[in-house]
Image (tube, rainbow, N blue to C red):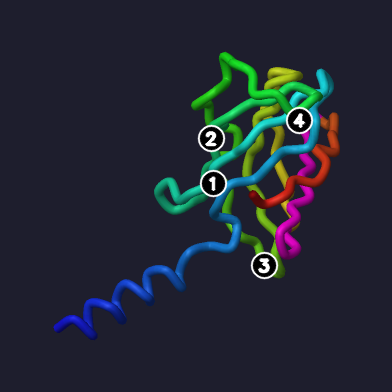
Amino acid sequence: MGLATGLVMAAGLAAADPLEGTWQTAQDDNGHFGLIEVKPCGPALCGKLVRSFDSSGKQIKSANTGRTIISETVPSGNGQYKGKVYSPDRDKTYNSKLELSGDKLKVSGCVLGICRNGGTWVRR
């Protein structure tokens, strides 16, 4: 019974999406950055802001802590994801394109024809 339980648990761990985990964002328009924790939310992936930092790396309080930053995100093949990304510094939600390569995540998105490069996030 113990071996079967171990195999089932190992299979569950192997099924985790490579995007899951904690990501440090690029600096925003204000020089701030944050840590986003990505995990499953229904059939998609979502990421919440868990900590915020100023441009010097000092942790700061943010009204956006706990806010969903990545939502409705699903893999589209070859390390690519599509979904939505909220940008606190511009108070806009973008249709996003995420490109995962190892421990780096290129983030970009568009809203009403206006596109933005969200920089490269790094796995923490």
Queried whether the magenta region covers residue 103, the answer comes back as: yes
Q: Position of residue 44 (x, y in %)?
A: 49, 51
Q: On the image, which quarter does residue 37 sit in?
A: top right
Q: Is residue 101 left or right of residue 68?
A: right
The residue singled out by tag 2 in the image is: 48
Residue picked out by circle 4: 111
**Pointer 4 and pointer 3: residues touching (CB < 8 Å)?**
no
Q: Percent position (x, y) of residue 54?
A: 74, 21
Q: Is residue 63 above or below residue 4?
A: above
Q: Earlier in the sequence, mark 4 or mark 3?
A: 3
Location of the N terminus by quadrant is: bottom left
Residue kind at label 1, given as amino acid type: Val
Distance of label 4 from label 2 (alpha carbons): 20 Å
As drawn, 15 above or below 1: above
Q: Which residue is mark 1?
A: 38
Point out which mark residue 77 bears.
3
**Which three-letter amino acid code belongs to the residue tagged 2?**
Lys
The residue segment tinted magenta is: 100-112
- Say whether disc 4 or disc 1 marks the residue closer to the N-terminus: 1
Residue at image position (74%, 19%) is: 89
**Disc 3 element:** strand
Residue type beneath disc 3: Gly
Which badge, 3 or 2, is on the more N-terminal residue?
2
